[in-house]
C-alpha cells in the first residue's frame, strides 16, 4: 500500500487539535521537538513506526486510522469488530470512550483518564458484577411482563383477533379449563386460552416480583461496593 505523507500529516494535526495541544506540547509528550511535529504534519517526513505507536496511544486510535488506510477512513473498523464480538452498541462504546478517553471531550481529560480506566477495569472484572447482570436480566424479564411486552409478543405470535377471542373466553362466566360441562373449544382455541391464562398469571405476579428484585439488586450493589472498597 502507498502511503501519502501529506494526508497522514493532516490526520495527525486533526488529532492533535482535538486534544488542544500545540505542536510544541505534542513534541514534549513524544520527546521530540515541535519542529519535527511540524514536519510530520506538513508531510515532509514519514513518521517512524515507534512514533506512530506512541501517537496511537495518545490519540486513542488505530494505526491504520493515522495512516489513512481505506478500511479505517472513519476510524470504525475496530469499533465494528468490537460490536460484532461483544454485542455492544455504538452508544455503549461511545460511553466507554467517554470514561477512558484522554481528549477534551472525555470526562477524564488528561489527568483523570488513567484513574477512570483503572476503576472501570476493576468494575468489569468483578465477580459481583456477574451476579448483578444475572439479576438485571431477571428484572428485565419481569419488568417486560409488567409493562405488557409479553402481550405484545403474544399478539405478534397468534394475531390480535385470536388474542381477543382468547380474552373473551377467559373473561366469560364459563370455566373452560375446569368445568366438565363447559362447551368444547377447538384445539386452537384451547391453546390460545391456555396462553392467555399463562400471561394473566404472569402479569399478576410481575409487579410484586419487580419490587423484590429491585430490593435484591440494591443489596447486590452494596456487595459490589464492598468488594471494590472493602
Image: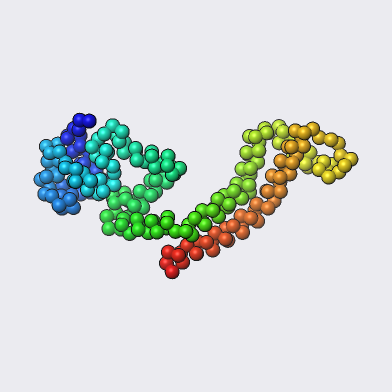
In the current view of this chain or complex, which residue is farthest to the bottom? Answer: 230
Instruction: Say whether residue 5 is left or right of residue 144.
Output: left
Front-most of 38 and 86?
A: 86
In x, y percent, where is residue 180? Answer: 87, 42
Front-most of 144 and 192?
A: 192
| Residue at left offset 61%, top offset 43% | 149
From where the camera sits, is residue 16 visible?
no
Colour setup of the view: rainbow
Instruction: Say whether residue 77 is left or right of residue 179.
Output: left
| Residue at left offset 37%, top offset 59% | 119
- Image quadrant occupied by the C terminus: bottom left
Instruction: Say whether residue 143 is left or right of residue 161.
Output: left
In x, y percent, where is residue 184? Answer: 84, 35
In x, y percent, where is residue 76? Answer: 34, 38
Front-most of 75 and 207?
A: 75
In x, y percent, where is residue 34? Answer: 12, 48
In the current view of this chain or complex, which residue is farthest to the right? Answer: 181
- Image quadrant occupied by the N terminus: top left
From where the camera sits, is residue 230 visible?
yes
| Residue at left offset 19%, top offset 46% | 50
Amino acid at each position: 500500500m502507498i502511503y501519502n505523507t501529506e494526508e497522514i500529516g493532516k490526520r495527525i494535526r486533526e488529532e492533535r487539535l482535538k486534544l488542544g495541544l500545540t505542536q510544541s506540547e505534542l513534541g514534549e509528550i513524544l520527546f521530540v521537538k515541535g519542529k519535527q511535529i511540524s514536519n510530520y504534519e506538513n508531510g515532509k517526513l514519514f513518521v517512524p513506526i515507534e512514533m506512530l505507536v506512541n501517537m496511537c496511544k495518545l490519540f486513542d486510535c488505530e494505526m491504520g486510522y493515522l495512516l489513512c488506510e481505506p478500511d479505517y477512513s472513519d476510524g470504525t473498523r475496530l469499533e465494528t469488530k468490537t460490536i460484532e464480538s461483544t454485542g455492544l452498541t455504538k452508544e455503549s462504546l461511545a460511553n466507554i470512550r467517554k470514561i477512558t478517553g484522554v481528549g477534551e471531550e472525555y470526562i477524564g481529560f488528561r489527568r483523570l483518564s488513567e484513574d477512570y480506566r483503572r476503576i472501570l477495569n476493576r468494575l468489569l472484572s468483578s465477580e459481583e458484577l456477574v451476579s448483578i447482570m444475572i439479576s438485571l436480566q431477571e428484572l428485565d424479564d419481569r419488568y417486560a411482563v409488567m409493562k405488557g411486552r409479553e402481550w405484545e409478543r403474544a399478539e405478534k405470535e397468534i394475531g390480535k383477533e385470536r388474542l381477543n377471542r382468547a380474552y373473551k373466553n377467559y373473561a366469560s362466566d364459563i370455566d373452560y379449563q375446569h368445568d366438565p360441562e363447559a362447551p368444547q373449544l377447538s384445539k386452537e382455541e384451547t391453546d390460545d386460552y391456555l396462553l392467555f391464562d399463562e400471561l394473566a398469571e404472569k402479569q399478576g405476579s410481575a409487579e410484586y416480583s419487580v419490587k423484590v428484585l429491585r430490593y435484591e439488586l440494591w443489596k447486590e450493589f452494596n456487595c459490589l461496593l464492598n468488594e471494590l472498597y472493602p
